[in-house]
Amino acid sequence: MSKLVVLKFADGSFEQGFPVTLQIGEEGERPSTEITGKLPAAVEMPLYYSHWQSSYRRLSNRYRLSADQMQVTNVSITQDCDNIAHILRSRFNTWLLTEEFRPIREKWLEKLLPTDEIRVILQTEDSQLQRLPWHLWDLLERYYKAEFALASPTYEQISLRKTRNEQVNILAIFGNSQEIDTEADRALLQHLPNADLRFLVEPQRKELTDHLWGKSWDILFFAGHSSSQGKDGTGRIYLNQTDSLTISELRYALRKAVERGLQLAIFNSCDGLGLARDLADLQIPQMIVMREPVPDLVAQEFLKSFLEGFAGGESFYQAVRDSRERLQGLEDKFPCATWLPVICQNLTQLPPSWVEITGKVELQPPKLTPPQSAPPPKIAVALLSSVVMTALICGLRFFGLLQSSELQAFDQMMRLRPFILHEIPDPRLLLVAIDDEDIDAQRRNGEDVNGKSLSDKSLNKLLEKLQQYKPQAIGLDLYRDFKAELPDLTTRLNQTENLIGVCKNSDAAIPVKGIAPPPEIPQERLGFSDFIHDPDGVVRRHLLFMNQEPVSWCRATYAFSAQLAFRYLLAAKGIQPKLTSQGDLQLGNTIFPRLSSRTGGYQGIDANGGQILLNYRSSNKIAEEVTLTQILSNQVNSSAIKDRIVLIGVVAKGEPGDYWATPYEYQFDKQMPGVFVQAHMVSQLLSAVLDKRPLLRVWSLWSEVIWIWGWSVVGGVLAWRLRLLPRLTILVIVSSGVLYVLCFGLLIHGYWVPFVPSALALVGTFCVVFFETSNSKLVLLQK
């Protein structure tokens, strides 16, 4: 049964904080749980949103808004919007992790399961609180069947006089569509099953009100220009080239439509929260609006996906969530597209299904009882069930349905490794970490750091200092796609033979040409800085080499980390890189086998280029770390630099972030600086060649299948041999623990083996065999 969760925000403000009440209950029943808490003051939160909103609206896509001609989106503005969105998400989740709000969070986790279908209602009058990205709450993202909606604190149940329709009656209004394509919306609506459609194209005001009064409508749809105007954000829709209306000017007609059975209003137009606030007074059961100006393609793709899901049998909330999340495929061109659709809900109403909207009741066919046959031998049941369960689990795995959970289990084991596997920082590396104090010190010295974290003057001094102590290699993990202003720096960059620079690769899927390298550094001393992150944003793979695209400004074939390792190994051991006949990188006697598209928990990934799994070092820090100020003020001993690889990068919190989620930490505020990730990559290559430290590998496909089947047999045998459920449950839990310990031990030794599929096979086969043998015993007793 689905659950209803209501978060009530009483009178409060961002200056004083918000009292919060959490209610949890079964759908359609009174709440069974209620608890109070508080969100503390956070005066900066509306500013973060305003900053993101300003950045989003500067993207200049063609919005469904009564605006002038838009310009082509600038790539840097797009990246800026993404960066600010990450910051807003981080600050928002940090706010929701405060101590005063903890009772709400803990009660949620106690009462709700990740598999529950949940409607989460945010009940507040504060318009700024409504605008925050609640769908990005880390707690909500754990529940894949949960979706949130906004609701007004004041509501009432309307007395409906709904008629039973043979079809879903839809009134589709196409208002002023200058510069946007509403024909695509019309085509989508025309393909709906069991729908009676009436189209009004750029209607006059009287024509619209006559239609609202004249028939019992189930769904109201509007496409065209709309906006929220004025200090109070009054919603306005644009009917045609000359006429526009506020919701209050349609109040009587819309109220009559609600009384006659209007169930859903969809405003596939811009800036709809103002519309929603005005429409809430009319007690429309459900609405879908757009949080901010919406690009044309985003509006159409959302409508297509939602209508397919909802008319195809999905619940209303699940159809909205699935359709909203599918917009992620457009976020390379339309950042934050998944932020836009929002449900607004009347708390007295239950969301109907597509069939329920008509009022028809479908008769279920009678269930036929199949003839019973004699139960098969119990051991045969256990073995057959194990084979079937293994095939099912491997099928789910093949289609990528277990990838997310397998990666999370992998991360959890990686976080446990430092407690068992004690590794010291890599003594071959030194990190020059440029922090906020270093940048402030440069400004106090009158150095130009606008748009840079390291001025030309300080960089010249730093390279001069480092070269005095003869490091094996220097890695400059800073983008410098501009010429040096100092002649001395130009010469030093060009003639420092052990200096490696970075550039960024382009991507054909996104019209971006990457970032050009420092013009003074020759191509043979360049490495690309690109990381590969998984769909959840975590860096678990190490890209060693790839073929650059012809239009890319970055022509480096090997990664920045690989170039630094090559320099060190050549100088220290005379080892040069080469590729095997299979296209794998070989350094000395060590071969780095490339990942395939199906490797371990990965299923169907893009495995282009030379990718390996990244085996992070299990230590509190990857290497010794010094600041820029310490180097320039001669506070660092020469032995800390001599014969080492020195990596120079930014760790300043105040700069645009080069921070990455790793298996060790997901939270934005605790992510790893890019230069640290590069250090882990360099250390992995050197340690594998010089220290014989194991690389992360996986078993062959058939070995993994046999492993999963073996644990499936364990579950079946336990259920076959034992009869007492409490004892069986304990043994299954113990067996799962043993499985986890074995998988963790193998990971320490460099093998990533399937834990989640094996655990599912173990528990699944146990349940099937236990209930099958129990039912068989019941049949025999009845006979």
Image (spheres, rainbow, N blue to C red):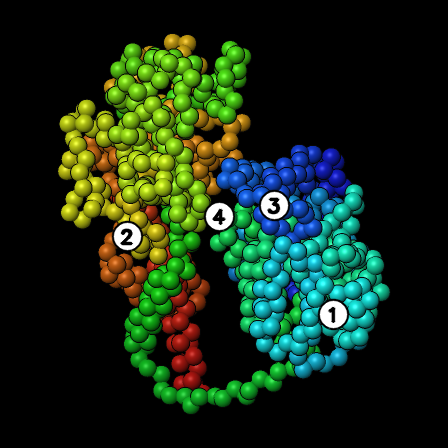
Q: What residue did someone put label 2 on?
A: 596
Chain-order first, disc 1 or disc 4: 1
Q: What residue did someone put label 3 on?
A: 70
Q: Nearer the viewer, mark 4 or mark 2?
A: 4
Chain-order first, disc 2 or disc 3: 3
Cα distance in 3D space between marks 2 and 3: 43 Å
Asked whether, in this view, residue 2 is left or right of residue 241, the answer is left
Secondary structure beneath disc 2? loop
Chain-order first, disc 1 or disc 2: 1
Q: Nearer the viewer, residue 40 or 373?
A: 40
Q: What residue did someone put label 4 on?
A: 332
Secondary structure beneath disc 4? loop
Identified by mark 4, the residue type is Asp
Cα distance in 3D space between marks 1 and 4: 37 Å
Cα distance in 3D space between marks 3 and 4: 19 Å
Residue 739 is situated, as x and y percent measured from the top left of the image, at 33, 54
User: The C terminus lies in which quarter of the figure?
Assistant: bottom left
What is the crowding at mark 4: few (fewer than 14 residues within 10 Å), some, or many (at least 20)? some
The quadrant in which residue 148 appears is bottom right
Cα distance in 3D space between marks 4 and 2: 25 Å
Identified by mark 1, the residue type is Leu
Could one spot residue 395 in this view of the protein? yes
Asked whether, in this view, residue 7 is left or right of residue 185, the answer is right
Q: Are marks 3 and 4 in contact (CB under 8 Å)?
A: no
Q: Nearer the viewer, mark 1 or mark 3?
A: 3
Q: Nearer the viewer, residue 240 or 164?
A: 240
Chain-order first, disc 4 or disc 2: 4
Residue 30 is situated, as x and y percent measured from the top left of the image, at 72, 63
Residue 402 is situated, as x and y percent measured from the top left of the image, at 40, 58
Give the label on residue 262, or none: 1
Chain-order first, disc 1 or disc 3: 3
